[in-house]
Amino acid sequence: MKIGEIQTVKLDKPGARYGEEFSENGKVVFKSRESAVSEIHRLWNNAQQHFVSIGRWLNAAKDALPHGEYEQMVVEQLPFSPSIARQLRTAAEFVDSGIIPREQLPDSYATVYQIATLPKPILEEAKQKAMIRPSITRRELTELKRLHKSSSSVPHVDMAKLIERRRRLLVELLKIRRQMKDANSRI
């Protein structure tokens, strides 16, 4: 895509419009604990759901901008780090892939990023066991990764083969030392 071409970005449907929770003078109107909790939840959910739109915009910008300009834009002009931008992009790509339906995913981009970066066998296992759900935590995902890493990182070792290989290498090393000693004595 070239600069100036129109880029279409799929956006999540926004909730209430900005400012609806304010009175005319710009102050929050506190009516009750319940109404405050309800409004905070609504705003929080709205903010969390926008991570997909932000990730889509980042992906569109990365695709459209010339090499190097995207990173410069993130570093100089956006309110988050390149690491967060990468997580937002990856999370949006994962949501858009449809591998797991959006309604089964958490509203946290960081948690969706953790799901998106699960190795395929672990992700498949998690899907089969219905572990991926809106309430899954990053801690649960980190533990899942750790358990799989510890169980798969220790391959079966045939000690007899290792001992034999060590013996052959020591014999070879002795031969090399003798050759070097012979070569030095001729000099």
Image (cartoon, rainbow, N blue to C red):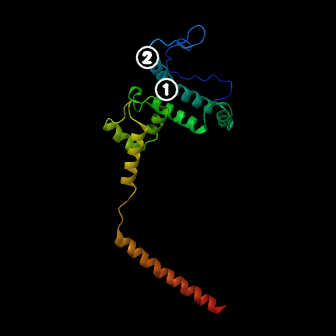
Relative to 101, is 179 on the left or the right? right
Residue 138: name its quadrant.
Answer: top left
Residue at the image point whose x is 30% and y is 38% from the top: 129
SS at mark 1 in the image: helix
Q: Which amino acid does label 1 sit on?
A: Gln
In x, y percent, where is residue 94? 47, 33
Residue sitting farthest toward the left: 129
Q: Mark 1 points at which residue?
A: 48
State if disc 2 and disc 1 touch (CB < 8 Å).
no
Residue at the image point whose x is 51% and y is 84% from the top: 175
Relative to 83, is 171 on the left or the right? left
* Cα–Cα span, label 1 and label 2: 22 Å
The N terminus is located in which quarter? top right
Position of residue 150 relative to residue 93, above or below, is below
**Residue 145 versus residue 185: which sits nearer the camera?**
145
Residue 69: name its quadrant.
Answer: top right
In x, y percent, where is residue 22? 55, 12
In x, y percent, where is residue 187? 67, 90
Q: Which amino acid does label 2 sit on?
A: Arg
Residue at the image point whose x is 63% and y is 22% from the top: 6
Q: Residues within 10 Å of mark 1 (few under 14, many from 20)?
A: some
Choose the circle earlier in sequence order: 1 or 2: 2
SS at mark 2 in the image: helix
Position of residue 146 relative to residue 24, above or below, is below
**Residue 122 versus residue 185: which sits nearer the camera?**
122
**Residue 19 versus residue 171: which sits nearer the camera?**
19
Residue sitting farthest toward the top: 24
Label at residue 33: 2
Residue 160: name its quadrant.
Answer: bottom left
Mark 1 or mark 2, which is nearer to you?
Answer: 2
Q: Residues within 10 Å of mark 2 (few under 14, many from 20)?
A: few
